[in-house]
Amino acid sequence: MSQTLAYITLIAFIAHLLSVSGLRCHQCNSHDNEDCASLVVNTPRAQRDEQYLLDCEPKGEEQAFCRKTVIKLEVNDEHRIERSCGWIQEKAHNTCFTADNEGYKQIVCTCSEEGCNGARALTGPGSALVLALSLLAALGCVLQR
């Protein structure tokens, strides 16, 4: 890796760490709009995956996170998916848990990366790992010189 590329990688990593922007999560309910269930493709060339990706409005001092809730209604065997922002941290964060309520069951997943409550996440903990490995490679290249 050239020294210039190492510096560019280092600057990109630092810029990523210092960037301050609000969290955006998918916000929809499959009961109101069936596209929310899978965030399907609109046309062969244009994906609709970002149609529900909205800023999480701040609520006081609470840090926003993304949430995906799958609800199974036992009465009519109906499944619903709700994608939303959350502010009150669950006991377990960046993970899923189940709740067995009277008449319905829930699977609730929380995460804190941009758009991570979609059908498939393109960003997440893996992107941080790639950035960290890039930084280590860049530093190693710089230190060898």
Image (tube, rainbow, N blue to C red):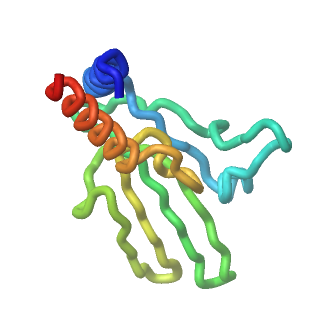
Res 53 quadrant in image: top right
Residue occupying the point 28% across, 57% down: 93
Q: Is residue 46 visible?
A: yes
Asked if residue 56 lies left or right of residue 35, the reply is: left
Q: Nearer the viewer, residue 132 or 103?
A: 132
In the rendered image of this protein, does residue 105 appear above or below residue 13? below
Residue occupying the point 48% across, 78% down: 105
- Residue 11: x percent and y percent? 30, 18
In the rendered image of this protein, does residue 48 appear above or below residue 78? above
Asked if residue 138 lies left or right of residue 49, the reply is: left
Q: Which residue is the extreme one toward the left?
A: 143
- Residue 69: x percent and y percent? 49, 62
Q: Nearer the viewer, residue 117 or 59?
A: 117
Residue occupying the point 59% across, 83% down: 74
- Residue 114: x percent and y percent? 44, 39
Res 60 quadrant in image: top left
Q: How many marks?
A: 0
Q: Which residue is the extreme one toward the front?
A: 145
Q: Nearer the viewer, residue 63 or 16?
A: 16
Q: Which residue is the extreme one toward the right?
A: 43
Asked if residue 18 lies left or right of residue 81, the reply is: left
Residue occupying the point 34% across, 15% down: 4
The C terminus lies in which quarter of the figure? top left
Q: Is residue 20 visible?
A: no
In the rendered image of this protein, does residue 68 appear above or below residue 73? above
Asked if residue 107 lies left or right of residue 1, the reply is: right
- Residue 106: x percent and y percent? 47, 72
The N terminus lies in which quarter of the figure? top left
In the rendered image of this protein, does residue 130 appear above or below residue 21? below
